[in-house]
Amino acid sequence: MNIVRNDNEFLWNKITAKGSYEWWYFDCISDSTDYSLVVILYSGFPFAPAYHKDINKGKDMCSLDFPGVTLCLYKGNRKVINIHRTMKDIKYTGKGVSIKTPGNILLERKNDGSQHIVIETSSLYRNKSFVCELNFFPIQNLNNQILPELSGIKDHFWKPANPKGFITADINIYKKNKKIENIYIKGSGYNDQNWGFVPIYHEISEWNWGRFHSDELNGIYFDVEYLNGYDERFSKLILYDNNGKLVYSGKASFFYNKKRNYFYLNYGKEVKIESENISIIVNCIDKVDNGPFYIRFLSDFKINYNGKNITAKGFTEYVSPGRLKNRFLYPFISLKLK
């Protein structure tokens, strides 16, 4: 895994390598309700079985061929909206990207650094459509304090674009063209970007990621393990305060108390992270998305930093990319694309 400097500019790499992927990730946890939200826009939907089928057939499919969107709204640990769609067209607009058919999606970066997203999409199975307008205002810009970190193998990349921001989301739900519900969310949010010049399952065995925000300290962790010593294990912990100061960025030790889900996915129900004067316990109990190759949690964090105890909540994810090569699981994965 390679870390790219946060240059505070919109970036679309337009990768044409076979099996490549790219995504822009946003999440939000409401500060006044039990709603939370995850939005991901894709150039090269790396989890679509149709994409991998075409690659396995020898077709030169790349990130430009399989754009898509994820729109997930949760109330507690219950899904209210759960959309994962592949789409047909993605174009650069000068300030962002436009993704179309079916539906319309616009991601635009404003001159003040904020980002504006409009999503118009529908569910394949529930005869519902959704319009989501999201605004992300960075309040935690680390001003390039997170330094670039390049491995010897430059295939997978991570850009921690805006580790903390303020998000508003206005979501309208329609059934048979009639608005049946409006949900408004405001709260703390996170934004990053990932891309790769190879399929996401290329030589990666496990992918663990998480973030937390609190009134005292904020953090991101990333732990990526590779197959057969392909690359050095990427075990990274980043901590920053609410004044925009980076207080730690470096390696960490990760320990997992594991459990299997009903797809026999062996995930860490408890994650222990240790580094210099830092100890973090992540309790991954509340599954908000539970599938054959990844699990997303609303997790509880217990942080001991320089002898001070801090509690927080945040999103965490476990991904087993190799599952995407298992054709037996394709029907189960396809069920999530709706």
Image: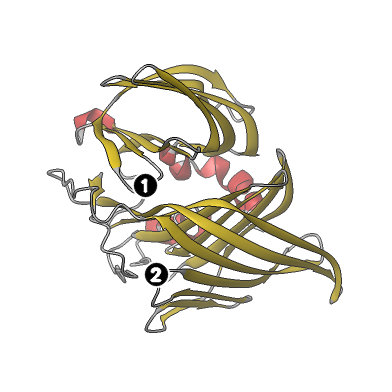
Which of the colour schemes (rainbow, by chain, secondary structure, one colour) is used? secondary structure
Residue 38, given in percent of the width and then of the height, sits at 58, 53
Q: Amino acid at mark 2?
A: Gly
- Badge 1 vs badge 2, beta-carbon distance below 8 Å: no
Residue 83, given in percent of the width and then of the height, sits at 65, 58
Q: Observer-nearest residue: 174 or 140?
A: 140
Q: Observer-nearest residue: 268 or 226?
A: 268
Extreme residue toward the bottom, this view: 94
Q: Amino acid at mark 1?
A: Asn
Extreme residue toward the front, this view: 243
Residue drawn at x 28%, y 26% is 252
Instruction: Tell me the element at label 1.
Output: loop
Q: Which residue is mark 1?
A: 243
Q: Quadrant of the C terminus?
A: bottom right
Residue 167 shows in the view: yes
Going from the N terminus, do you reach mark 1 or mark 2 first?
2
User: Between marks 1 and 2, how big is the CA–CA gap?
Assistant: 18 Å
Above or below for 72 versus 122:
above
Label for residue 113?
Answer: 2
Q: How many marks?
A: 2
Residue 121, given in percent of the width and then of the height, sits at 67, 70
